[in-house]
Amino acid sequence: MKRILFIGQAPPERMDGVPFKTTGLFRWLSSVGLEYEPRTDFKLFHNQEGVFVDGKHEISKKKTAVVAIVKFAALIDFFPGHAKSGGHLPPTESQIVAARPALRKLVSQFKPNIIVAVGKLSIQEALGREVALSDVVGKKFAMSSHGLSDVVVIPFPHPSGASTWVHMSQNKLLLKSALQLLRSEIGFTS
């Protein structure tokens, strides 16, 4: 069974048990037939799609298989505050550097097969370089670090409502490609 680590930028102001709960991430996953079920071990399910009935496509929410154990992490372990313009402050470089040992320890203990780097800062941390979202979303990258080998990194844009990147038509296609890559890495090709 695959082990997937989603790495975001920072935890929310209040943790209600499920990171990314108020963002578009779970809607994105659901759009490619992957459903998330929070429990003690978070699990990602592959859903069987329905059939055409009376000209409408009905989607069955029947869980067909547990396909991954999921863990959520962030570049820093605290909420960095609110931006004056609205939204949340991104973590600073010094905050990321200070939290890096704890994140590396988590990665080495969890031993993920797949890292989904969520948001530009997380992508840059995972890939170890500056990036433009349009150059990396929709692609996968091999990573060998933290005592691990053959880890696949799949960049996702940040799913907050504040990001306008995901609303541009060419970027929607890149996001769809990233979601399909995740499905494929889990083991579903259709």
Image (tube, rainbow, N blue to C red):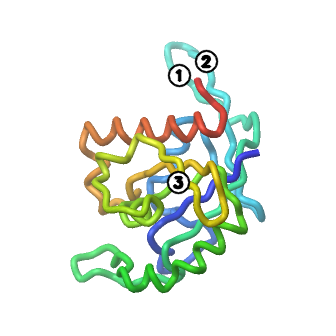
Identity of the residue drawn at 67% across and 29% down = 48
Estimate how packed mark 2 is, as few (under 14), some (14 to 19) or many (20 or more) residues with alpha carbons within 10 Å.
Answer: few
- On residue 57, the disc is 1
Q: Position of residue 20 (x, y in %)?
A: 51, 63
Decide: marks 2, 1 in contact (CB < 8 A)? yes
- Image coordinates for residue 169, horizontal then vertical, percent: 25, 37
Residue drawn 53% across and 22% down?
57
| Residue 103 visible to the viewer | yes
Name the mark nearer the viewer: 3 or 1.
Answer: 3
* SS class, disc 2: loop
Image quarter of residue 96: bottom left
Quadrant position of the N terminus in the picture:
top right
Q: Is residue 103 above or below residue 20?
A: below
Nearer to us: label 2 or label 3: 3
Left or right: where 154 falls relative to 94: right
Q: Which residue is mark 3?
A: 116
The Cα–Cα distance between marks 2 and 3, rounded to whole angstroms, is 31 Å
Residue 27 in sight in this render: no
- Relative to residue 162, is residue 61 drawn left or right? right
Front position in the image: 158 or 123: 123
**How many residues crowd around disc 1 within 10 Å: few (fewer than 14), some, or many (20 or more)?**
few
